[in-house]
Image (spheres, rainbow, N blue to C red):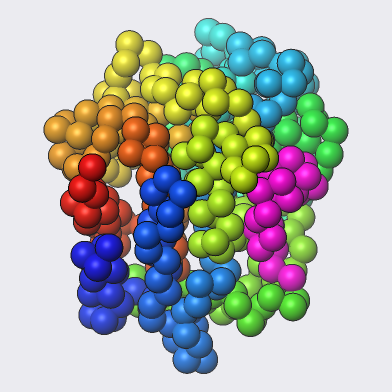
Amino acid sequence: MERVARVVRRYVDAGRYPGAVTVVAQRDQVLLFEAYGRSDVERDRAMTTDTIFRIYSMTKPIVSLGLMQLYEDGLFQLDDPVVKYLPALGRPKVYDADGLRESSREMTVRDLLMHTSGLAASNGKHPVSQLYREAGLAGMDSDAPLSELPGRLAGLPLQAEPGTRWIYGISTDLVGLLCEVIGGQPLDEYLRTRIFEPLGMTDTGFSVPEASISRFAATYGYDDGGFKLTDDPLTSAYTRPRTFLSGVAGLVSTAGDYLRFTRMLAGGGSLDGVRVIGPRTLRFMTTNHLPGGQDLAAYADFGGETKRAGQGFGLGFGVLLDPTVAQTIGTPGEYFWGGMASTAFFVSPADELAVVFLTQLRPSASYPIRRELRAAVYASLTD
C-alpha cells in the first residue's frame, strides 16, 4: 500500500491538495487508512482519520440505495411514472431551440435513478439550467424544503425527452423526495434509521453538529496550481440545520463512515451481520442500465466534460464496462462515483475491494488523482 500512499502524499507535498484521507480495504482487512496533510490550512489543523468532509455527489449512491430499499418492500415499481407519487410535478414540456414541445412519455422512477429523466443541472450551461437558476433552484443553497421542488419544476421544461439522454442533473433530489413520500419520513430521518444507524455511520448527515465542528474540514478552490479557501468550516452553511435536504450533494461524512458503506456494498449488502439491501437488488443496481449496453460516451450529454468511454451507469452508480476502452486499469463490474470536492470511492466485487478517498478541493477535475489512485491500488493487488 506504500505505492497508494505515495500518490496522495505527492499531491499534498506539492501544495495541490491541503490534505486527504485514503482508505483501502479488501475482504475483512483494512490495508490502508492514512490521514495526511491539513484539514484546515488557515488554522493549521492536521488531517485526521475522523475529519468530516462534504462528500457532495457521493450522496447520490446512498440516497439511491435508500429508495431501492422501498422497492424491496414492494412499495413502488421502477416503471411507475414519477407523477404518481409527486403529482405537483405534472408532465413538463421539453425544451427545443424552436420552442417547447410535449414529451413523448412521462419520466419514471428508474429515469430518476439513472439520470435519464430529462431534468437538467442547476449549475449547467444549458438554457434550461439558466431557467432553473432564475427560478431559485440552486439545490443545496435553496431555502425551500425538498417538498416544494416538484411544484417549482412543474412550470419549467426538460432538457431532453425522458429516457433519451443521460444528463447529470437534479434527478437525485427527486429520488430523495420519493424516499420521503413513499417511506413516510423526512429524508434525514429516513437515511438515519434505514442506513446510517444500522451501519454505525455516526458522523454522516446533512449538517455538522456543534460538538463536531472542530473536526470539519475547510473547502478550497483550485488556484493556479494551488488552492484558496472557499468555505470556512466555522462559518459554513453545513454548521447549521439545512432546509433543503439534497439527495444530489447534501451529505457530510468521514472516511470511516463511508468505508462502512462501501464495505457493506462489497459484502453484497450486509456488514457485521446487518443487512441493509439484498444482494440481488445490489447487483441489479450496479449493472449497466443504459440501452443496448451503451457507455456514457455514447449516451450522455456532458456539456463538454470528460466523456467516460467504457463506463456505464446503473441505478445510482457508475459501472466499469471495459478497462481497455476506459483506458484505466480496473476489473469489469467495478462500480464507483465521486464528489465535486475531488472525493471518490470504488468497489470491485470480484476483488472484494473497497477504496475511499476524501479531500476538499473544487472542482473535481482539477487533477487526475482518481485514475492515478485506481492504477496504484490495482497494481498493489497480488491475487
Residue 240 forms part of the magenta stretch: no
Q: Residue at x 56, y 9 (%)?
A: 105
Closer to the camera in the image, 373 or 86: 373
Where in the figure is residue 15, as x and y percent of width and height? 28, 81
Closer to the camera in the image, 33 or 19: 33
Whether residue 280 is visible, yes or no, is: yes
Q: Residue at x 78, y 45 (%)?
A: 193
Q: Is residue 217 above or below residue 133?
A: below
Q: Residue at x 48, y 24 (%)?
A: 283
- Residue at the farthest top position: 104
Whether residue 224 is visible, yes or no, is: no
- In the image, 375: left or right of 203? left
Q: Residue at x 66, y 35 (%)?
A: 276
Where in the figure is residue 60, as x and y percent of width and height? 55, 42
Q: Is residue 307 above or below residue 361?
A: above
Where in the figure is residue 174, as x and y percent of width and height? 65, 34
Where in the figure is residue 34, as x and y percent of width and height? 40, 71
Quarter placement of the N terminus: bottom left
Extent of the magenta region:
188-209
* Callout count: 0
